[in-house]
Image (tube, rainbow, N blue to C red):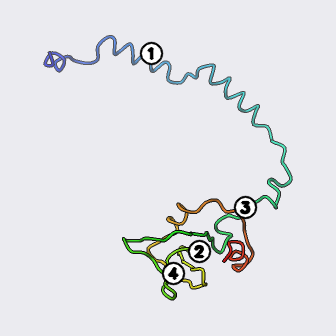
Amino acid sequence: MFERIRRRKGPSETERRHFEIWARMEGQVPPEVERTRAALLRAAEPIAQVDDFPPPELRVPSHDQLDGRMMPWPWPIVLDEELVACSECGTYRDWLILSTRDQVWLRCRTGHQQHEPRLDTAWYNRNAGPADAAHDTFEDGLRHLGH
């Protein structure tokens, strides 16, 4: 059977008719497309501009407008099967986690800060909830979070 197909010379009558019809239809556009294009062009009229939306008091600063972000972390932090403790006072829970300039810092309740290279901004973003406030100074943020 496959041998007969290979021996056949040129396209069959059905294939030839199909190619002819396809060639005739190639430059044509269905009328529905033209109606849709016309409707879209009519709908593309200029939209009235609003003064300032949302108002400035409701805007949230973007990540590049912030010097950093912070969140409370009351639980112990275990990295690589090791409990992370403050290098100065030895406390191992009730952290304030700071994310700034693609680094993560841990701050204990007594105010000691240490860089934690095993944590990154992606970890911070996965674990942080939505921001509930923006503060002008670092100290204002600490007061807001009770540190």
Q: Quadrant of residue 1?
A: top left
Q: Earlier in the sequence, mark 3 or mark 2?
A: 3
- Tell me which residue sits at (26%, 18%) in the image: 10
Q: Secondary structure at mark 2?
A: strand
Q: Earlier in the sequence, mark 4 or mark 2?
A: 4
Left or right for 69, reference 18: right
Give the residue at mark 3.
60
| Distance from the alpha carbon under mark 4 to that under mark 2 | 12 Å
Q: Secondary structure at mark 1?
A: helix
Give the residue at mark 2.
96
Dot label at residue 91: 4
Dot label at residue 143: none
| Distance from the alpha carbon under mark 1 to that under mark 2 | 72 Å
Front label number (1 vs 3): 3
Front label number (4 vs 3): 4
Q: Earlier in the sequence, mark 1 or mark 4?
A: 1
